[in-house]
């Protein structure tokens, strides 16, 4: 027996759970946005997580420790050491001992890593504009402020 779509029981949603609705909407939006950016990064043979590491290191030319990089990541990667090793093997970053504390290994972006990011800057910016530009500067500013607030629970 086939059940038509008219005969199906409608999905019931809990009323009044606004926090849950916002959370689900945030997750759907994050997934939507990241899936639209992946082809730009894939064309450069780099993952979103690898791009994030290189972007972080570009902002820290003196280098960062593994723990510092992990704390700045957009999404946490439990195997940050292996991720850094892959990027080092590709020649996009280098690792070496800190001259002031030999126990600390500092990771720095290489010229090849900077060159790759420079090549990605325009396509990534264009993707961001296509995905979010329709909101306009005022809504984007408000959205950024609200998202910042959401990460600092009362």
Image (spheres, rainbow, N blue to C red):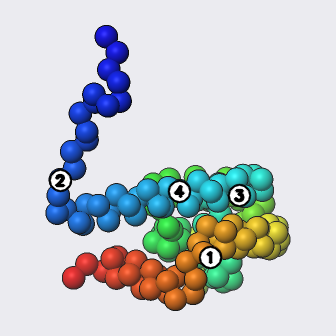
Of mark 2 and mark 3, the one earlier in the sequence is: 2
**Residue 56: image location, x then y, percent:** 61, 74
The answer to which of 113 and 142 lies nearer the viewer is 142
As measured in the structure, the alpha-carbon distance from the residue carrying label 2 to the one carrying label 3 is: 38 Å
Of mark 2 and mark 1, the one earlier in the sequence is: 2
Q: Quadrant of residue 38?
A: bottom right
Of mark 4 and mark 3, the one earlier in the sequence is: 4
Q: Quadrant of residue 134?
A: bottom right
The answer to which of 114 and 85 lies nearer the viewer is 114
**Under tag 4, what secondary structure?**
helix
Of mark 2 and mark 4, the one earlier in the sequence is: 2
Q: Residues within 10 Å of mark 1 (few under 14, many from 20)?
A: few
The residue beneath circle 1 is 133
**Under tag 1, what secondary structure?**
helix
Of mark 3 and mark 1, the one earlier in the sequence is: 3
Give the numbered dot on residue 41.
3
**Under tag 3, what secondary structure?**
helix
Which residue is painted at 32% across and 62% down in the image? 23
User: Can residue 56 be seen from the camera position used here?
Assistant: no
As measured in the structure, the alpha-carbon distance from the residue carrying label 2 to the one carrying label 4 is: 24 Å
- Say left or right for 26 vs 137: left
Q: Residue furthest front?
A: 6
Give the numbered dot on residue 32.
4
**Mark 1 in CB contact with mark 4 (< 8 angstroms):** no
As measured in the structure, the alpha-carbon distance from the residue carrying label 2 to the one carrying label 1 is: 33 Å
Give the numbered dot on residue 14.
2
Mark 2 vs mark 4: give the one in front: 2
Which residue is painted at 71% across and 57% down in the image? 41
Q: Residue furthest top?
A: 1
- Say left or right for 10 vs 16: right
**Mark 2 in CB contact with mark 3 (< 8 angstroms):** no
């Amino acid at each position: 027996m086939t059940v038509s779509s008219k005969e199906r029981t409608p999905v019931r949603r809990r009323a009044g759970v606004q926090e849950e609705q916002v959370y689900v909407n945030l997750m759907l939006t994050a997934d939507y946005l990241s899936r639209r950016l992946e082809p730009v990064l894939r064309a450069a043979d780099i993952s979103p997580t690898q791009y994030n590491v290189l972007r972080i290191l570009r902002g820290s030319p003196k280098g960062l420790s593994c723990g510092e990089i992990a704390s700045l990541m957009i999404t946490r990667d439990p195997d940050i050491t292996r991720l850094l090793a892959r990027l080092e093997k590709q020649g996009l970053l280098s690792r070496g001992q800190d001259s002031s504390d030999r126990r600390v290994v500092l990771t720095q972006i290489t010229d090849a890593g900077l060159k790759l990011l420079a090549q990605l800057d325009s396509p990534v910016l264009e993707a961001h504009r296509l995905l979010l530009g329709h909101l306009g500067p005022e809504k984007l500013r408000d959205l950024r402020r609200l998202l910042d607030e959401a990460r600092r629970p009362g």
